[in-house]
Amino acid sequence: MEKTFDAAAAEPRIYAAWKSDGAFAAGANKSRDDTYCIVIPPPNVTGSLHMGHALNNTLQDILIRWKRMQGFDVLWQPGTDHAGIATQMVVERELMETQQPGRRDMGREKFVERVWQQKEKSEGTILGQLERLGCSCDWSRNEFTMSDNLSAAVLKVFVELYNQGLIFRGKRLVNWDPMFETAISDLEVESTEVDGHMWHFKYPLAGGETYEYVEKDDDGTITLRETRDYISIATTRPETMLGDGAVAVHPSDERYAPIVGQLCEIPVGPKEHRRLIPIITDEYPDPDFGSGAVKITGAHDFNDYGVAKRGNIPCYRLMDTKAAMREDGAPYAEDAALALAVARGERTLTEAEADQVNLVPDDLRGLDRYAARARVIEQITTEGLAVMVAADHPDVAWMKGQAPTWDKKGRAGLAPPLPDDETGPQTLPLVEAKKIMQPFGDRSKVVIEPMLTDQWFVDAKTLAEPAIAAVRDGKTKFVPDNWERVYYNWMENIEPWCISRQLWWGHQVPVWYGPEVDANGTSGLSMERRPFCAESEEEAKRAATNYYSSTLGHDVRIHAQNGDDEIVEIQRRGGTGPALGIEGVSWSDGKIDEIRIIRDPDVLDTWFSSALWPFSTLGWPNQTPELARYYKTDVLITGFDIIFFWVARMMMQGIKFMDEVPFHTVYINSIVVDGHGKKMSKSLGNIIDPLDLIDRFGADATRFALASQEVQARRTLRMSDQAAEGGQRFGTKLWNAARFAEINQCYRPHDSHTGADTQPHASHTGAIRPELAQHTVNLWIMGETSRAAAAVTKALEDYKFNEAATAIYDHVWKVFCDWYVEFAKPLLMGEDEAAKAETRATMAWALDQCLVLLHPIMPFITEELWATLSNRSKALIHMDWPDLADLSDTAADAEMSWVIRVIESVRSVRAEMNVPAGARIPMVLTGTGDGVAGRLDRNSALIERLARLSSIEIGAGAPEGSVTLTLDDCEINLPLKDIIDIAAERARLSKAVGKTDKEINGLEKKLANQGFLAKAPEEVVEEQRHRLEAARSDQARLNAALDRLSAMK
RNA sequence: GGGCGCGUAGCUCAGUGGGAGAGCACCUCGUUGACAUCGAGGGGGUCGCAAGUUCAAUCCUUGCCGCGCCCACCA
């Protein structure tokens, strides 16, 4: 054998061998009927895998390998996720960086083709990384969320939910990403606290009306009384004033009671077309915040939207898809007049009509929202309608002579000084500097704009109910279970899930629109759209044919066509226009004979397809044998960050379409951070690349480092080179133990009849059955091994990966290497052939068990050693997991732990007394109890060797000049007359006496406590008595040793 | 505002209602026939603070302090 394990060379070779042997295939090595299935959390095809993936997949592989060895019919289903918005972004960025034509220049088809190339590239990288890590996925079943079958599953689910009314389309306020120009779901919004400002403006009352404005403190004392001709409004978003539909105050707010129902003027826009809006009441405004009055902009604020809905206030959209001020529609004057008529109650608008109204003044049209904000503020201030306060007012952020301005991200900065006289202004507009929570797109990192648009939604509330119940009933358990609360909290407050995205990369919505047939219309067709939801174009056409021929009373030909951006625009605006189908209608002989239906160009949220992963990858909607066999799957291992995105949605869809939860256990793994506890990020430059770690330390070392640090309920796992080095050292230690075994010809006896590797507890050869073993050390290691096996198994059953790793680590290093190998040496090098054979067989067996137990965590080195050490009928990956009875031999355990104590005691005192490491010294045991002689007889060679003794005797008394150590059943005397430092020895003994003193005191006190004696369990009391006795005896003997020392001089 | 996690050796972290642990780092010694990616030995902790429950608290309860994260609509 080589001196060390060359991971870089061996790991790929071993992996290739497994692969070519079909070792990962579903059902490989199964010896029982039960299945064990894990579906991989499909990595995004955006790039490569990070440390979090390495952890996640290591944990999955550990469970998979363990269960496979246990004989389960195992399937680890691999695959990748198309990751809609993220992947589209990667490609768009790359196009930009390489100065290629952008998405819109390329056109949808070409662009999507380009994204497929990205998918191929990234998928190759990812699969390669998983292989390097040693993942034993069934690669023959590799899947992709946009493969034919998975896309078919998506279509079927969409259509079924649509037909059941669980998917619907509606105009709602959604989170809009102005960079990607798409709607996103609530979950894709990250709120971040930023420095913001709050402006206070005056909305003059219509017709110059005035009222008594009275402010009171908490005691009801009047603190301010003045006549006002305005209502004061505080806002962080002045540009949205243009779309205000009302001003709301709390119904109980006495300050504004006199003017509720009146109209006030929005103080911006061309004077001749100033708009009036009503002052209404709503529960939403908090009288104690700001001025207590809130401007209501239903189309650009989620709260305002709610108020607007309740109060039947129109929602006027101000911005386009890039969050620039609208340029479309009628001239401002026309629409402002229309809005004014609405405010006066002279007419009403439908939602769609309101959306057509463009209330952006002509001079602001086309401006970015932040540029528009600056202009609005400037105009209002210039006009004197800002609330003014003394220049030294504490809330004034608009510092003397300077005005706030805005960068692209909406953050305030400072503008050049305003013109001013020499003394400076006495009053300034009130602008409060304020921390505000600003929503950002999680991918684009730009400020999200609430936008009123038509989108597709899933009725998540309905689907969530059984998914909540499933966890409540224990059908699915979270490990650790505190995540269940997080799950409930979200699921119980779930909102409709916005699933449509105005992107190109994804599953296109399977809905085609044609013109609605007017119920009694003479024209036959209306401008409204009629959706046809179907799994294919053919079916959509069939549905359309049926619809039109039955409603129009004659046959029509249907053409289908894909939607394009122009149509998207129209859809977003609410829906009417020539492109929606009327244009595609042709007439002949006064009758409609051809109608074109147009497919919705939107695609679905990427999580819509991921939600189906546990059953779509198994073949659904086809009723495949795999689906029947492996669903429900067993465990899902994932990070807490996608409990909402993914886990919850898999629960919903799994129950809905399979009538069964997708998995019985959800294990939530840690988040990998760097060695300093910092989140790994590109900007911090602290990313640890798993491939780099694998290159430098090996996959086994990386896996061990991850597994040994994966602790339940701990949120973060610190990964560092140091941790990987630890894993590597462990591998080397094991490697060298195996070298020792090989050098000493510790081979497994081979059963020539069955060809099977023999197990000691079921051996046909007889050589190593524990009941036939003669030698205590061999009996002992069997017991240790069986206990280690039980510990590892228990840890894995409980998903305690760190405990599994620690259990096998300690067993290999501290038991097998530190003691058993040393204990075995005298036997292996002795003359007793029978003892030699027994020890060789036992060591071979014990080492094999180590390899088996370690294999799930460190598969490569264990497989390599397995093949190296003996001729095997099977690769280790397919060996049986030990199901050992407890092989403990009480007498052997007691004896070996006594031997270990003796050796450790001698070693300790030698080091303390500075006995040269090479010097062999004699040992005399005194005060020996029962059995010591026998133990000594059987183990003196071991003790002499490991404690470096020249001789061992049992004596009547301690030789003069001895160093004395106390064990419970004897004293160890080391005659060190020549080298002993009396003072040092006295100090050592005194320290030991002091220690026993402390213990005796504590125990005596405890045993004198009546409460303790009366209430503590009998065995605890007994144990304390025992300990007291031992401590007293110990102390007596130490004192005796001290006396001898004094006598020595 | 609500929820969660964490404060144990210099560092990173396990752990337990009844005698404080590991890895790394540090100190001393060591080329003993598997291994210097090693071996032997050692130093080092009021288990965040306070109160309570208990015969007994590092562990359970409560409060406080500190750190981190998640969710949430205060204009």
Image (cartoon, rainbow, N blue to C red):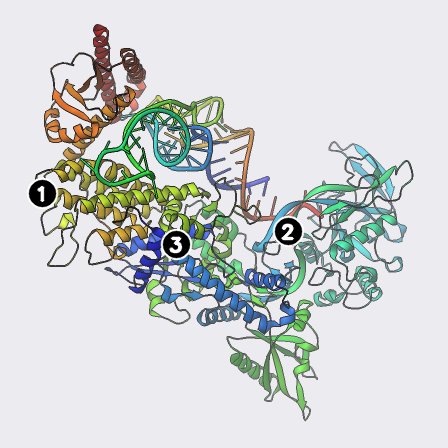
Q: Position of residue A1012 (x, y in %)?
A: 30, 21
Q: Considering the numbered disc 2 on the image, is that residue within a helix, a strand or a loop?
A: strand
Image position of A970 with respect to B60: above or below: above
Quarter of the image where the C terminus of chain A is located: top left
The circle on residue A772 is: 1
Give the side of residue A332 with respect to residue A586, left or right. Answer: right
Please state if A372 lies on the left or on the right of A481 as rendered.
right
Q: Where does residue A710 sit, x and y in percent of width and height?
A: 40, 44
Disc 3 marks a residue whose amino acid type is: Leu
Residue A133's disc number? 3
- CA gap between label 1 and label 3 equals 42 Å
**Residue placed under numbered mark 2 in the picture:** A439
Q: Which mark is residue A1042?
A: none
Residue A969 in sight from this viewpoint: no
Left or right: residue A889 versus residue A175 is left
Do we see residue A162 in this rendering? yes
The answer to the question of whether label 2 and label 3 lie on touching residues, with beta carbons closer than 8 A, is no
A276, A74: nearer the viewer: A74
Q: From the viewer's perspective, is the residue at label 1 or at label 2 nearer?
A: 1
Please name which of the two marks, 1 or 3, marks the residue nearer to the observer.
3
Q: Residue at x 12, y 55 (%)?
A: A751
Residue at far right of view: A421
Q: Is residue A350 left or right of residue A429?
A: left
Both on one chain, marks 1 and 3?
yes
Residue A462 location, x and y as percent?
A: 51, 60
Query: Considering the numbered disc 3 on the image, is that residue within a helix, a strand or a loop?
Result: helix
